[in-house]
Each structure stands twice: as structure tokens, then as C-alpha cells.
Amino acid sequence: MVIDFHTHVYPDKVAGKAIDSVAKFYTITVQGGGTVEDLLACGRRGGVDRFVILPVAGVPAQVESINNFTAETCRANPQLTGFGTLHGDMEHPEDEIARILSLGLRGIKLHPDMQRFRIDDEGMYGIYDMIQGRMPLLLHCGDYRYDYSNPARLAKVLDLFPRLTVIAAHFGGWSLFDLAWEYLCNRPCYLDVSSSIMFLGPRRAAELIRMYGAERILFGSDYPMWDPGEEKRRVDALGLSDRELELIYEKNALHILEMAGRV
């Protein structure tokens, strides 16, 4: 089974606007349509069986409705597993964390660059403490344009919250891949390969996977930015062993998702 641990979808009526915003933020041409139907079609074409949906709330007022949409979408589509979103400026995050669990969502996604908070901001410590040991946290990490998600900041949080299960997206530091290795090589976190291999090249990507260890790596496409089938082909071409591929495509993902209940 192939599990794509890093995807984004939007309600049909706002998907076009959402992907235009993503394209502007990253100055790229987005490949996917951003809808559930399009994501599942990409999976069928590309040999990807299941997807983890990662929402992001730009402002606190969006949190509840986005989490409701994600939960409803996952209930209607058994190939999908959802994470919830929070916002650092929201009131009573403990209530939404409890609601996220009650909705059957399996973790939390935060995007420091889009949500404008530093990973090691003390104002986020309460959220980290409330979710450590209860559900995993996937963090966007790295961007040479910003300092919010610098991997050095994540390293500090990992030291302070040893029971926090973190997936550091984009090899722990998009466009800061070597800095991510410096700070995260010996710290307890997972990393996904989303939005990375095409920038690193296959040789360096394979080296990083083996430097971190395949038992720490998750497959992710960052759909709709990229096509899941094409990203799978990039991983398949790295020359990894069957055991490494099994860990990256399936076993690591299942282990993490089991934290917050049955998969």
C-alpha cells in the first residue's frame, strides 16, 4: 500500500481560489485541481492508495469550519485520513483539540510561514503540551524567505517537548535541507519528502533518506502543488531497497496514524 502523507484539498466551490493563493505564495504553477475528486483520480492513475489531508487555517475564525470540512470529507471517502488545524491566536485551543479527536481526525497540521508564528514561540507551548502524547503534529518546515519555520527552531521545541511526535515536512527544511540535517539528524522526529526531490535531485534525496534512516521518512506529494503519481515515480527511481520503500510508503505512516486511534 502507498500512503501519501502530505496532501491538501478544498471545497469544490473555493478550490480554484485556494490554489491561486498557493501558487502566488510559492510562485509556482500548481499541477492539481485541489478537489477531492481530482486527488482520488490522481491516485488511481499514479498507484497511490491512500492520502492524509492536511488543512491550514489562515485566521482563527476558519478553524472550526475547516476541521468540519476535513472530517466530513474523510467520512465520505475511506481512502482519506484527515488531520485538524489550529491557529496560535485562537481562544481555548484545548476545546478544539478535544473536538478534533471527537471528529476522528488523526493529528494536527500547522504552517508557521502562512500562519505567521515562529515554531519556538512560547505562545505555542501550551498547544504543544496539550497534544504531546495524544496525536502527531505535522509542521511545514523551512523556506529561505522566512524565519518562522527554521529547523533550528524546531530543534528547540523537540528538546522541550520530548513526547511530541513531529513530522517535519519537506525533509525538515525546504530550501534549507543541509541546515535541517545539522539540527534534526539526531533529534526524534519524522520527515516527509514532499516538495523536495525535484529540488534536491535523486542522488542527494537518496543520500538524505539513508542519512536520516528510512524508518524516519514518509512519502508525501504536497498535492495539489504536485501530482502524487509523479512524486511516487520520483521515489521509485531513487534505487531504494524494498524494505526502505515499504517503510516510506506504508509502515511509518500506519505507525503514526495509530497514535490517535484506529487507522
Image (cartoon, helix red, strand yellow):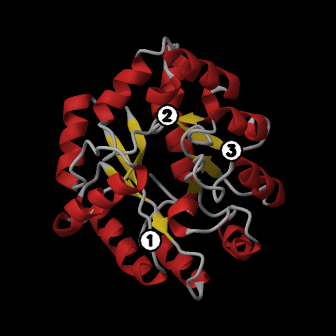
Identify which residue, 53 or 145, lies in the foreground: 145
Q: Residue furthest right?
A: 159
Residue depicted at x 39% and y 39%: 221
Q: Quadrant of the N terminus?
A: top left
* Amino acid, disc 1: Ala
Identify which residue, 84 or 207, lies in the foreground: 207
Asked whether the residues under the numbered discs 2 and 3 touch, taking CB atoms below 8 Å apart as contact, a structural biologist would say: no
Q: Which numbered tag is attached to residue 203?
A: none
Q: Nearer the viewer, mark 2 or mark 3?
A: 2
- Residue beneath disc 1: 57
Q: Secondary structure at mark 1?
A: loop
CA gap, disc 2 to disc 1? Answer: 23 Å
* Amino acid, disc 2: Ser
Residue depicted at x 48% and y 29%: 199
Q: Which numbered tag is attached to residue 196?
A: 2
Identify which residue, 245 or 60, lies in the foreground: 60
Residue 100 percent coordinates (x, y): 48, 73
Asked whether the residues under the numbered discs 2 and 1 touch, taking CB atoms below 8 Å apart as contact, a structural biologist would say: no
- Residue beneath disc 3: 189
Q: Earlier in the sequence, mark 3 or mark 1?
A: 1
Q: Secondary structure at mark 2?
A: loop
Q: Secondary structure at mark 3?
A: loop
Asked whether the residues under the numbered discs 3 and 1 touch, taking CB atoms below 8 Å apart as contact, a structural biologist would say: no
Q: Earlier in the sequence, mark 2 or mark 1?
A: 1
* Amino acid, disc 3: Cys
Residue 59 percent coordinates (x, y): 46, 78
Q: Is residue 108 visible?
A: no
Residue depicted at x 59% and y 61%: 135
